Amino acid sequence: MSAAQKTIGNDEIDQAQDDFTAALAWHDGDAEATIRTLLANCKHLRQQLVLAEISLSLGFTRGWRPCREPAAAAVEGAIVSG
């Protein structure tokens, strides 16, 4: 792994930690409330994705379909870029 890749990885970890700290602070340190809010947001975004999937035509997206699971998106991204 190159130094640039390590730096990018560290930046992503730092950003994730900052996001976590900000979410927890928003709920005054209440971890359960933070998790409940994040799960509710996830549910809402999944519902929005379903609506977008229904309304998008295959011609408009050139055959691309949204993935509901992050692991599936990572595999598809590797196939496209590989």
Image (tube, rainbow, N blue to C red):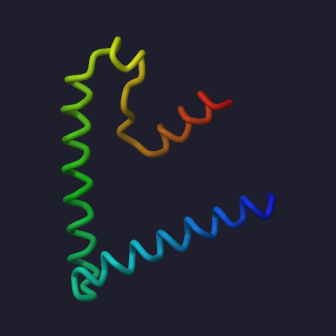
Choose between 47 and 11: the one closer to the eye: 11
Residue 22 sits in which quadrant? bottom left
Is 33 placed above or below 1 here? below
24 relative to 40, above or below? below
Position of residue 41 measured from the top left corner of the image (x, y, whole percent): 22, 57
The spot of residue 34 in percent (x, y) is 25, 74
**What is the x, y in percent for residue 11?**
59, 68
Viewport quadrant of the N terminus = bottom right
Q: What is the total number of numbered labels drawn onto the structure image?
A: 0
- Residue at the spot 26% in from the left edge and 22% down from the top edge: 56
* Residue at 72 percent of width and 59 percent of height: 5
Q: Is residue 32 left or right of residue 67?
A: left
Q: Is residue 59 above or below residue 26?
A: above
Residue in view at x 20 percent, y 23 percent: 55
Q: Which residue is found at the position 20% from the left and 77% from the top?
A: 33
Left or right: residue 34 compared with residue 15: left
- Residue, far right: 2
Q: The C terminus is located in which quarter? A: top right
- The x and y percentages for residue 24 are 31, 80
